[in-house]
Amino acid sequence: MSLPDTSHGESRAEPPSLIERIRSLFGLNNPSIRDDIEDALEDHSVESDFTPQERTMLKNVLGLHELRVQDVMVPRADIIAVGIEDSLADVLSVFRTAGHSRLPVHGESLDDPRGMVHIRDFVDYIAAAAEDFWKGRGAKSEPSSKRDAVMRLRGLGELDLSLPLSKAGIIRSVLFVPPSMPALDLLVKMQSTRTHMALVIDEYGGTDGLASIEDIVEMIVGDIEDEHDEDDSPRIDVQSDGTWLVDARASLQDLGEALAFDFVAMSGEEKVETLGGLVTTLAGRVLARGETFEAEDLARFDVLDADRRRLKRIRVTLLSQPVSAQGK
């Protein structure tokens, strides 16, 4: 005797999705998932397993959809490039001084882009040319004696580095994008095309800037420095008129000790560590070069150098005595 089928009309409960679990973690119920998570990340009273660094990265990821290419690009004035008719010796010199692995290539000017050259392609070309010379002198495919090794080194010395870059056959294509393109869309396009450099072209067809995949990733994880980046300590220099010229990345603690002023107290409850972060937080935006911001009759900040993403150099003028969180 079979039992009646009572499963009709019943539905098995499906496990919660990842988004639902994240919302549950923060105790969120609003229709907008993005707003829910952004509000929760701003609320430090909410207990979670996220570290401050994770909170920052999550906020950066959520904010990435608002960024355009113009917000992350290197401006035209800061682009380091080589001409298509430059000699290989000149290109090698630029690689050496610029410290970049990719260089845009142009015709008569940056408004005539021709592509880019990668340091690996450049080294491969030089190594292959030296090996051809080496083999042409009767050396074996692999150096088996001191004589073969000397011939290989001599091959490097015999290279004609006066050859123009256009004749080397190592120029690769780049992406061309408008400044209004969403940065996230560019990141996806770079991944799919395996092209890590894009030239930003304005409405008149001129070169407005340059964006790399590293520029976009840095908007999420912060500045990325490699072994060749200079590790210069931020400068804090007093001037004859009593003002201070300060690198924006100088820490508030170091700045406070130098000026005997409590800059940390000025930040209130905001968790900022650098002068650039303090000024941006107080102003509510990234100030442009030449702008001035005065903080409640305590200090004036004149922006001497900045780009669209961050402040670089600031003149600090104290307008009052220290806010005495330093105990005096």
Image: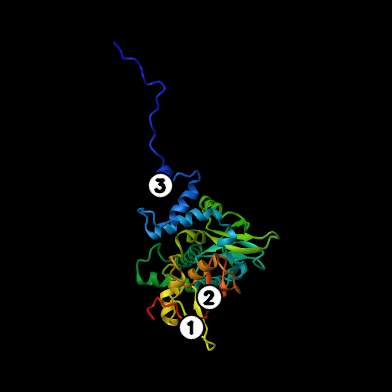
**Tag 3: Cα neighbours inside 10 Å, few (<14), some, or many (≥20)?**
few
Q: Residue 98, which numbered label?
A: none
25 left or right of 106 in image: left
Crowd rating for badge 1 (residues with CA inside 10 Å; few <14, some 14–19, many 20+): few
Looking at the picture, tell me which residue is in the foreground, 303 or 321.
321
- Disc 2 crowd, CA 10 A, few/some/many (<14, 14-19, 20+): many
- Relative side of 258 to 165, left or right: left
Name the kind of residue labelled 2 in the image: Arg
Secondary element under disc 1, as helix, strand or loop, is strand
**SS assignment at label 3:** loop
Residue placed under numbered mark 2 in the picture: 313
Whether residue 230 is visible: no
Q: Residue 206 in the image: x percent, y percent?
A: 67, 63
N-term mark: 1 or 3: 3
Residue identifier under label 1: 237
Badge 1 vs badge 3, beta-carbon distance below 8 Å: no
From mark 3 to mark 2, how far is it between C-alphas? 42 Å
What whole-number distance in Å separates the C-alpha atoms at marks 1 and 3?
A: 48 Å
Which residue occupies the foreground of this view, 79 or 289? 289
Choose top left, top right, bottom left or bottom right for residue 301: bottom right
Q: Is residue 127 above or below residue 67?
A: below
Hey, what amino acid is under mark 3? Gly
Residue at the far top in the pictured view: 1
Query: Quick check: marks 2 and 1 in contact, CB under 8 Å?
Result: no
